[in-house]
Image (cartoon, helix red, strand yellow):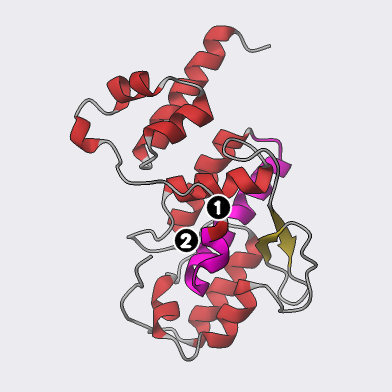
């Protein structure tokens, strides 16, 4: 059984990883329980390095986001859901899911760690949320996992951003440029297969990565 010291060390290690990924003080505090002032003194000795700006406080951004942002969010949500099913703690699953997302896309990353934290909060009903308002569903058409409002019924191609991404891939250079043609073992196989297929269809695609 983990001792108090073990739990504290684990929280410190997790806080260090979150800080390295760009998390805000409040985010690190909510995930690890370490007071914000202590997080700042340990991981942000230069006050200018502290992430600034208002963090998302609801899941509404996901519903209003463009197709590429929703697909990015689904990569994070699907991997997080997979890791939680395997028994990982929420904080650790978030860090691994976010790193997997970074491995599958090109910088600058359109989804910040804080936005991923917001997303996960409303999938699991933890941290920022008192109950789940988002769920991870499996598309009956392509087999990819995607995020939708709780209570949504998955119909073929209806709400799945991967199906929509596939339909528009031929015509949209922004989509072609947004996902690198390389494999990573840290993303669910079906999502990897879809992204690989996109690049088979347009192997030399170049263009500007759209901003968030």
Answer yes or no: is residue 71 visible: no
Q: Quadrant of the C terminus?
A: bottom left
Residue wearing tag 1: 186
Q: Of 208 and 159, which appears nearest the observer?
A: 159
Q: Quadrant of the N terminus?
A: top right
Q: Is residue 120 magenta?
A: no
Crowding at dot 1, Cα within 10 Å, few <14 / some 14-19 / many 20+, comes out as some
Toward which corner of the image does residue 44 lie, by quadrant? top left
Please determine whether, in this image, residue 28 is positioned above or below residue 93: above
Residue 65 percent coordinates (x, y): 50, 67
Q: Of 159 and 83, which appears nearest the observer?
A: 159
Residue 9 percent coordinates (x, y): 48, 16
Residue wearing tag 2: 104
Residue 53 percent coordinates (x, y): 32, 46
Residue name at image x 42 percent, y 36 percent: 18
Q: What's the distance in space between the residues labelled 2 and 1, CA to CA? A: 8 Å
Instruction: Look at the image and give the residue range highlighted in magenta.
Output: 61-88
Residue contact between numbered discs 2 and 1, judged by CB atoms under 8 Å = yes
Q: Is residue 76 magenta?
A: yes
Residue 116 percent coordinates (x, y): 50, 49
Tell whether 3 sits left or right of 181: right
Residue name at image x 48 percent, y 66 percent: 69
Magenta region, main secondary structure: helix
| Label 2 or label 1, whichever comes before in sequence order | 2
Q: Of 148 and 209, which appears nearest the observer?
A: 148
């Amino acid at each position: 059984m983990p001792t108090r010291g073990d739990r504290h060390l684990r929280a410190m290690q997790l806080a260090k990883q979150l800080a390295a990924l760009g998390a805000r003080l409040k985010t690190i505090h909510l995930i690890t329980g370490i007071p914000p002032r202590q997080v700042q003194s340990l991981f942000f000795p230069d006050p200018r390095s502290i992430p600034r700006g208002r963090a998302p406080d609801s899941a509404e951004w996901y519903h209003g986001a463009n197709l590429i942002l929703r697909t990015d969010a689904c990569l994070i949500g699907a991997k997080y859901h997979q890791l939680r099913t395997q028994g990982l703690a929420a904080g650790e699953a978030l860090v691994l899911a976010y790193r997997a997302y970074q491995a599958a896309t090109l910088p600058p990353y359109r989804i910040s760690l804080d936005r991923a934290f917001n997303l996960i909060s409303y999938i699991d009903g933890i941290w920022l949320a008192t109950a789940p308002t988002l769920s991870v569903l499996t598309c009956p058409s392509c087999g990819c996992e995607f995020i939708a409002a709780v209570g949504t019924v998955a119909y073929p191609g209806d709400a799945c951003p991967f199906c929509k991404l596939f339909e528009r891939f031929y015509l949209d250079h922004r989509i072609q440029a947004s996902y690198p043609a390389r494999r990573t073992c840290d993303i669910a196989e079906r999502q990897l297969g879809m992204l690989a297929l996109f690049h088979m269809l347009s192997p030399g695609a170049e263009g500007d990565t759209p901003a968030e």
